[in-house]
Image (cartoon, rainbow, N blue to C red):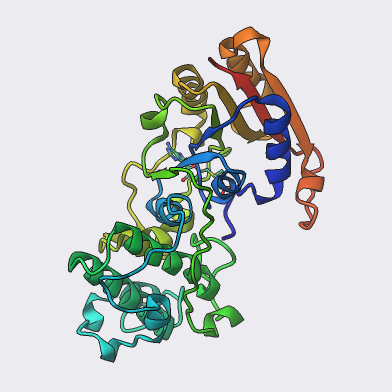
Amino acid sequence: MRYIGGKGLLLENINNVISAEIPNVSLVLDLFAGSGVVSSNFKSKGYRTISNDFLYFSYVMSRSVIALNRKPTFKTLGITDPIKYLNKLTISDTDFQTDECFIYNNYSPVGECNRMYFQPENALKIDIIRLTIEKWHTEQLIDDNEYFYLLSSLISAVPFVSNITGVYAAYLKFWDERTYKKLELTEPVIINNGKKNESYNKDFTELLSMKCDLLYADPPYNSREYLPNYHILETIAKYDYPIIYGVTGMRTYGNQKSVFCKKNTVASAFETMIRDCQSRYILISYNNEALLSTDELSDICRRYAVDNSFKLFEYDYRRYKNKISNNKKGLKEQLYLLRRH
Ligand SMILES: C[S@@+](CC[C@H](N)C(=O)[O-])C[C@H]1O[C@@H](n2cnc3c(N)ncnc32)[C@H](O)[C@@H]1O
């Protein structure tokens, strides 16, 4: 999934720093997992991986791809290939009514609604699949592992038919080609690393007491909140019929406004994280044009690093984003490393 601030292109640098600088890594906590690409990388390296994010749709994806080591069996359900079954499902195969189809009624141009996030057929398909997964779970035909496996397959499929340029903060005013494709679920790719990996959906402060070898922290770096940019994925994941407002049909915030997105709270957020964390090492992803300056973040790191262990690694943004043209000549991706315990 394309994700704001996603670190897919920085994995090699992250891996190099870990193998060169941190001895005996076994348990890693990815505190702000987002798309899960870094957690997946840790998992495939053989580390026992714990991932977390306060967005529920991010948790849903990690709860399947990170926490599971094999595809669930769907024994009780008695359908050999539930993904294939869901792909073929139509509303007439079910008892659902269009009134209860939240995405169809609010994010596709039907009835009073003029939002153009999805073609009506795909919106309806999202609803029918989501409602069916919920029904199977409520009726105990699928267990939690099977539930999150199917939900994560749905969440991953949605961006491929969405009428957006990458995020859900706006929809296009004409139908993009991709919206004419049929929504198609695919099997989540599950790696078995033989470890007891876990996923959480908590505020970062709630996991700081976890004793691990490495805390990898990639918090937001500017004032752009994540929820408005992914609100529809969050609503599909929760399917909680939220109150929505405005042109984009944004859901209201729960506790998902980030202290890392505000100038007056970002320094104390970093300080809390670094001071209270029980991990041996901390590796922070940030950049030199973020809300907190390089000097400010370096000062906090230095204050809490044991044995002068603080190190800063910088990577040229143009090389890191080599496929994307940009004018940000001085922008550098950064990795802040320190030993805490
Ligand atoms: C820069 S993104 C992480 C990107 C991720 N490393 C990747 O490669 O996809 C920051 C993430 O932090 C999450 N976040 C922000 N504030 C948080 C908080 N207080 N507790 C937990 N997660 C938070 C956001 O939801 C977002 O997914």
Between residue 222 and residue 55, name the one nearer to us.
Answer: 55
Q: Residue drawn 47% across and 24% down?
A: 273
Image point 36% across, 65% down: which residue? 236
Q: In this view, does 339 lie to the left or right of 143?
A: right
Q: Is residue 249 visible?
A: no
266 left or right, relative to 107: right
Location of residue 135 in the rendering, given as x and y in whole percent from the top left corner: 22, 71
Front position in the image: 55 or 231: 55
Residue 111 position, x and y percent, is: 31, 84
Figure check: 251 above or below 275: below
- Residue at the image point whose x is 48% and y is 79% from the top: 184
Location of residue 12 in the rendering, given as x and y in whole percent from the top left corner: 73, 43
State which quadrant residue 139 falls in.
bottom left
Q: Position of residue 97 (x, y in %)?
A: 21, 83
Q: How many marks?
A: 0
Which quadrant of the rendered structure holds the N terminus? Answer: bottom right
